[in-house]
Image: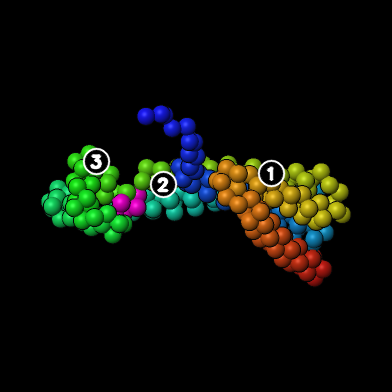
Amino acid sequence: MPRSTHPEIHRTDRIGWLRAAVLGANDGIVSTASLLVGVAAANAGHSELLVAGVAGLVAGAMSMAAGEYVSVSSQADTESADIAREHEELRNQPDMEHRELATIYEKRGLDPALAIQVAEQLMRHDAIGAHARDELGISAELAARPVQAALASALTFAAGAALPLVAALATPASHVVMSVSATSLVFLAGLGVLSARVGGAPMVKATARIVFWGALAMGLTAGVGKLFGTVV
């Protein structure tokens, strides 16, 4: 039989870190750019922008890391509890677990006899793996990884936040709003393209939604900064 040369490229193993990385970079660009635009709209100088931008970068990166770690840890705890429960059920009620797995395969389209045979063979090979994957929807590729998610979010947030901060400091104070807004939209578009290519998603759709929400956030904060700057 000739060896297959059909290449299959799947990206589900990237879901965990890719989601956290895109979220971190997007939040870093949007929140820092919005903060800088709001402060600049209130007629602030470069020193105020530097303080606001650096404070926003550090606080945001730590917040993203903590938030990702806590939320993904909760997911990991739930997965561990479910798997522990499956271990106990397999130990105490193996026949019932076998019928349960066979029923799952039968609902997916297998004949009853074949479903029973498949369930038997998979349980003989790796019972807990079969139940975790097909009953609970937990796989090694999609399992929760709190530390990975926290580091990806924090590092990408800091990288994203640094972009509008550099743009703000390299621009005369009177042009910061326009400069940061324009460059940040370019950065967001680039992030959309990059995330779409890495994740295999539609490029235009991914880019459009990132740019839209970034523009909305910066527009609203610019309005707030202008309003309060005028009042003060």
Query: Which residue is denoted by mark 1 in the rendering?
Result: 162
Task: Work out whether mark 2 precedes mark 1 in sequence or the reverse, and give the earlier one.
Answer: 2
Query: Which residue is denoted by mark 3 in the rendering?
Result: 126
Residue at 77% x, 55% y is 181
Q: Amino acid at mark 1?
A: Ala
Q: Are marks 2 and 1 in contact (CB under 8 Å)?
A: no
Query: Which residue is denoted by mark 2 in the rendering?
Result: 142
* Residue 71 visible within the image: yes
Q: Amino acid at mark 2?
A: Leu
Tag in front: 2 or 3:
3
Task: Say few, some or many: other residues with alpha carbon within 10 Å of mark 2 (under 14 / 14 to 19 / 20 or more).
Answer: few
Query: Residue 139 appears at what percent x and percent y?
Result: 36, 46
Task: Work out whether mark 2 precedes mark 3 in sequence or the reverse, and give the earlier one.
Answer: 3
Task: Say few, some or many: other residues with alpha carbon within 10 Å of mark 1 (under 14 / 14 to 19 / 20 or more).
Answer: many
- The answer for how far apart the CA atoms under marks 2 and 3 are is 18 Å
Q: Tag 3's secondary structure?
A: helix
- The answer for how far apart the CA atoms under marks 2 and 1 are is 30 Å
- The answer for how far apart the CA atoms under marks 1 and 3 are is 47 Å
Query: Residue 100 appears at what percent x and percent y?
Result: 21, 56
